[in-house]
Image (cartoon, coloured by chain):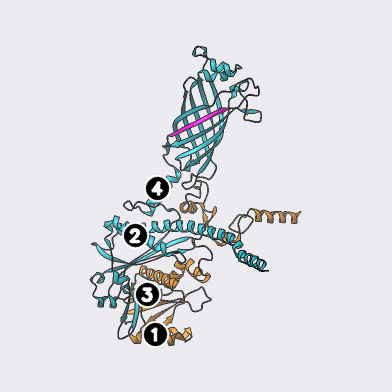
Amino acid sequence: MIPVFLVATGWLAFLFPSGPVPGLTRSNHWIRQHDCERLNKQEAYRKYPGRVPPPKAEEDGEVGVVVCRERVVRDGLRSPADEAVLRKLDGLVDELVSASEPYHASLDDRTWLVEVFYPEPSVSVKLSFATKNSLLQSGLQVSDRVPLLSAEDVNVLTRMHPDVAYPAACQRYADTGTLGPGEALLAIVRRDPRETVLHAGICVDGGWVWLK
Amino acid sequence: MKPLLAALGLCMLATPALADPLEDAQRRKLDELRSSVAGEVHLTALDMVDELVLGWKSEPVFADATPVVLASVTVPVGMGAGMGALIENHLADVLAANPGTQVQLVHCPSCTAVVVHSGPEATVVSRGIDNPDALAELEDTTSQNQHALYVDIEAEGAFLVLRARLTRMTRERPIVWSHTIASSTSVPSMLRAPGQLMTADEARDAYLDAIEGRGDIHVPLRVGVRTYAQPEDQAAVAPPPFLWFQSGAEMSLTRGAGWTGSLMGGFTFIPQAYTGLMGQARASRLITGRVRSHGRPDVYAFFGAAVINVWGPGTEPFSGQVLTGDDILTAQDEDIVNRDTFGTLQGGLDVRVGSRMGMSFFFEHMPSMRENPNMGAYVTIVNVPFQSLGTEVAFWF
C-alpha cells in the first residue's frame, strides 16, 4: 500500500508541481527562463498587485507565495559567460565595491578611476558604468578618465602571468604619470575566460593590491 | 540520360528548399517572440527614462539651464541598435517638454566623431568626447566646458536597470552626478505624456486604481436580439425576434471588477408589430482572471432576471392561444386586448474588450411560458426549458 501511495504522490507532484520545478506543465526550458522568488503575501501583493490578490486580515506574514518572472533576455541571445555576469551585474559590482571599502577612508581625498579587463567590450562598458555609479554612491570622487598605456607596454604585459601583469601595469601607470598621485585605480578583472566570478584590485602610487 | 541527370539535379536543388518552410516558420516564431519581448523591454525602458527626467525636474542637477551633450546610450547586450535610437529620441522629446530639468541637450559633432590625437606619450584613437585633450586642440567652442550624459540600460535577470551619469568635459573628467533606476514590478509600463510625468509611486497608485476599478460606475448601452424557439406543434407560431435597446448602470461589486452588477431598462418598438418595455438585473463573474485585464479581452459568466412587458400584434404568441401566421398578419389594433407581462431567468457569457465594447450570448427561461404551445425550447437542462436565445452588443461609456 505504501509503495503505491508513494508512486501516486510522486506522479501527482509531477503532474501538478507546487513550486517552480519541471513537471508535465512546466518544461526545463520554462524553469531556466524564469527567475522565481518566495515572498510572504503582504510583500507579494505590494510588488505584484495585479497578479497576487490582497492578503486577508487573518493571514500572517508567513504564508508564502512563489512569484516567477520571465527573464528579459532569452537563453542563447548572449554568451553564457556574459549572461552569468550581466544577470547579477548589480550584485557583482556592489560586492567588488564593498571589497574596496576598507581603503575608502584612507583614499577619500583621491579621485577614483575605473578600468575593466574583460574580453567582451560591450560587457566591459556595463561593468565600468555600474562600478563608477556604485563608487559615486559611496561618496567618493570618481572620474571618467581612463589611464592609458603605450602599445609596447600592453604588448609586454599581455605576455605575462596575471599575478605579475597587473602589478606591473600598475607600476607602469605610475611611472608614465597616467595615474597621478591624487588618483586611485579600481580595476575589475576576469582572470580566466572560464570563470564567471570577477576579481578586483586597487592601484595606488604604483602599488597593487588584490581585493578579491 | 541527360534528362535523368537534369531531374536528379533538380531534386538535389529542391532538397534544401523543402527544409526551408520549417526553418522559415521557426524564424518567424523567433522573430515574433523577439518583438514581443522587445516591445515590453522598450516600454519599460522608456518609463525609466521618464523617471530619470522627472528626477531632474524635481531635483535639478544644475542651477541654470546647462548644455549637455548626449555622449552615449547603450542598450542591453543582445538587443538591437534601434533600441538605442528609440531611447535617445524619447529622452530628447521628454527633455524638450520639461525645460524645468535645466538640462539642455546640445549637438556637438566633434564630440561624437572619432578623432586621432598624437601627443608626446602616445597616439590615441577615440571619440572626441572620450579625449578632452583632443577636443581642446580642436578649439571647438561647442565642446568646451560642457557636460556629457551617459545612459546605460541593461537586462539583469527579470529586471531592467537604467544607469545614468553626468561628466564634466574637462581634462580630469570628473563625474558630477550619477543615478541608478531599477524597473519596478509594481508599476507596469504605462507611457505617460511627456508633459505630464509622474513618480513611480503615483504611477503605482494610478495602476492600483485602474486594476481595482475603484469608483467605477459605467453606463452601458446594449443592442440585443431575443429569438424564441419554434414550438413542436408545426401549426403554432413562435413569437418573432425582438430587438431591444437597453441602458442603465453597471458597477464593480468587488476589487478589480471580479464581480459586477447591472440594472438596466429596455425598450423595443417595431411599427405595426410590437412595442415593449423591460427591466433587467444581472450579476457577472469574471472567469478569465481574478481582476479585469487591460491588455486582453475578458470573459464574464452572468446570470440575471428580467421582467418584460410587450404589446402589439406580434406579441399574440405570448398569450398562449394557438395562432396561425394568418391570424397574426390579419390582426387589427382593436383585436389586441392583452398586454403580456412575464418574467425571465437568464444565464450566458459576455466577452468584453477593455470595458469599452462587448458581445454576449445567453439562454433565457420563462417560467410562465412552460405550457405555452407557441413556444419550444432551445435547450432543456434538468427539466428546465430555455425558450429564448439572445445575443447582445454592448458599449460602455
Sequence-first disc among 3 and 1: 3
Question: Tag 1: residue type?
Answer: Ala
Q: Is residue B21 left or right of residue B80?
A: right
Looking at the picture, which amino acid does disc 4 mark? Ala
Q: Residue at x 48, y 26 (%)?
A: B279
The subunit letter for the residue under badge 2 reads B
- The tag on residue B108 is none
Q: Badge 4: how crowded within 10 Å, few (<14), some, or many (20+)? A: some
Q: Which chain is orange?
A: A
The three-letter amino acid code for the residue at tag 2 is Leu
Q: Secondary structure at mark 3?
A: helix
Q: Is residue B169 above or below residue B303?
A: below
Residue B60 visible? The answer is: yes
Which residue is the site of mark 1?
Answer: A151
The picture places residue B322, in percent across and down from the top left corner, at 61, 17
Q: CA distance from mark 3 to mark 4?
A: 42 Å
Q: Find residue B77 and report its horizontal and vertical position in percent.
A: 45, 67
The boundaries of the magenta stretch are B219-235
Provide the residue designation for mark 2.
B91
Q: Are marks 3 and 2 on the same chain?
A: no
Residue B57 x, y percent position in the rendering: 30, 57
Can residue B224 be found in the magenta stretch? Answer: yes
Give the structural element (helix, strand or loop) at label 2.
Answer: helix
Q: Is residue A30 above or below residue A94?
A: above
Same-chain status of marks 2 and 1:
no
Q: Quadrant of residue A142?
A: bottom left
Q: Are marks 4 and 2 on the same chain?
A: yes
- The chain shown in cyan is which? B
Give the label, 1 or 4, closer to the camera: 1
| Chain of the residue where label 1 is placed in the rendered structure | A
Q: What residue occupies the far right of the structure in this picture?
A: A1
Furthest-top residue in this view? B334
